[in-house]
Image (tube, rainbow, N blue to C red):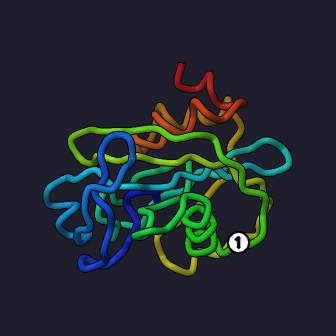
Amino acid sequence: MHGQNGGSADELVEEVDRAGDVVRVVTRAQMRAQRLRHRSVFIGVLNDDGQLLVHRRALTKDVWPGAWDVCVGGVAGVGENWQTAAERELAEELGIVGCEVGPLGLGAYEDAEVKLVASCFVARCNGPFTFADGEITEAHWVHTAELLQWLKGKEFLPDSLALLLPRLDNFRSVIA
């Protein structure tokens, strides 16, 4: 997922300021160890029935292992534009290529675990999905009302709840 994919420790990433402008290039290990702000993409996946794809992260993830998430995504590569990063993450995490991917806007998030600037997207796709990179252990389609119940009973990534859900028309009310 977004900002928290399973990239190698020596992978290069961009440290950015709050506006998303590149400050310098660092290793992923340095970014995590020093909690440096970086660029990520968050992609909410909706099917034709308006359901949101919700998934559980692998226990091998470097941040929030085993937690649930409302989007797929990850750290943008050095020099990679937002759209390309979103399409790459969809292919890597869900095995989908060529679905409609639309921008939802940019936002910044910071907590005790991460600091990031994320470009949010929505992808419209019914699947089928494959989880070849091993970052997702299970996935489910949920309607708005169901998501309310999921949020009460499971640990979810706070960054995507804060940045993506308010940008998805049918799911805005879930976190209001």
Image-based side of 49 in relation to 118, left or right: right
Which amino acid lies under the numbered mark 1 shown in the image of this protein? Ile
Q: Nearer the viewer, residue 45 or 134?
A: 45
Instruction: Say which element carries label 1.
Output: loop
**Label 1 neighbourhood size at 10 Å, few (<14), some (14-19), many (20+)?**
some
Image location (x, y in percent) of residue 86: 59, 61
Q: Residue at x 53, y 51 (%)?
A: 42
Q: State whether residue 155 appears in this view.
A: no
Image location (x, y in percent) of residue 155: 40, 43
Residue wearing tag 1:
96
Image location (x, y in percent) of residue 20: 39, 47
Image-based side of 64 in relation to 107, left or right: left
Please, is residue 136 above or below residue 140 in the view? below
Q: Nearer the viewer, residue 56 or 47?
A: 47
Determine the residue located farthest toward the right in the rendered image.
48
Please, is residue 85 above or below residue 19 in the view? below
